[in-house]
Image (cartoon, rainbow, N blue to C red):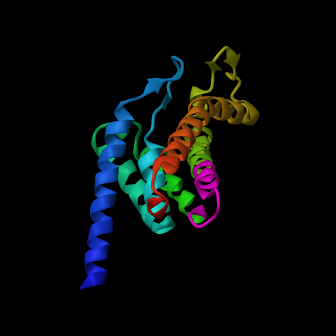
Amino acid sequence: MEQKMKKTRVLVECAILVALAVVLSYLKFDVGAEGGSVSLVMVPLVLIAFRHGTAWGVGTGLVFGFVKCVLGDGLGWGLPSILLDYVLAYGAVGLAGLFRKMKNGVIYGTLVGGMARFFVHFLSGVLLYASSAGPIYGLDFSNETTMGVVLYSIVYNGAFMVLSIILTLVVLVLLQKAMPKKEKF
């Protein structure tokens, strides 16, 4: 019975943090006119990964990505985009849990989870949005060569992901410092 209660508690915590991630996803600032935005959406997802492990972190990220699509944020681009840009990208953030037992794990985990999310967005840019490659941030990638598409995806996704990773890292380090020692994640 105690194991069942613990699992229920973790499920409820994951649901609450998915709801928090949804709210935080709407408190964002756009990076340039081309798209992409910076928010604190990864904070709750990394927290779950650190509190309950990689499997819970990945699962919670997958659920969050699906919820974002149901709320209308990604439905217009089709199933491949939904899977890559939302479900798998946010699921990848849960890889932060791989570092949960390490000293300074919050730093390494946030970097790895954020980079994993970037990589999925990057793949989506290369595989699905090659025709979108063009001028961005004053750079022109309009020649649809493989290298132009790769550079376009790196610049487009890197512009918001680097800032998102840094912001998430700062918030999580500050949260960890503010917590009592026995409560640290």
Q: Can residue 50 be seen?
A: yes
Q: Is residue 49 left or right of residue 163?
A: left
Q: Could you tell me residue 125's position as x and y percent? A: 58, 38
Task: From the image, give the main secondary structure of the stretch colored magenta.
Answer: helix
Q: Is residue 50 magenta?
A: no
Q: Name the residue: 54% across, 36% down.
A: 167
**Is residue 60 left or right of 113 when viewed as pictured?**
left
* Snapshot quadrant of residue 118: top right
Nearest the camera: 25 or 70? Answer: 25
The N terminus, quarter of image: bottom left
Q: Position of residue 177 (x, y in %)?
A: 52, 48
What residue is at 43 percent from the left and 65 percent from the top? 56
Image-based side of 150 in relation to 60, left or right: right
The span picked out in magenta is 99-112
Q: Which residue is pictured at 44% across the width and 66% down the height?
A: 52
Q: x and y percent of residue 157 in the render?
A: 59, 34
Nearest the eye: 24 or 92:
24
Q: Position of residue 85 (x, y in %)?
A: 48, 43
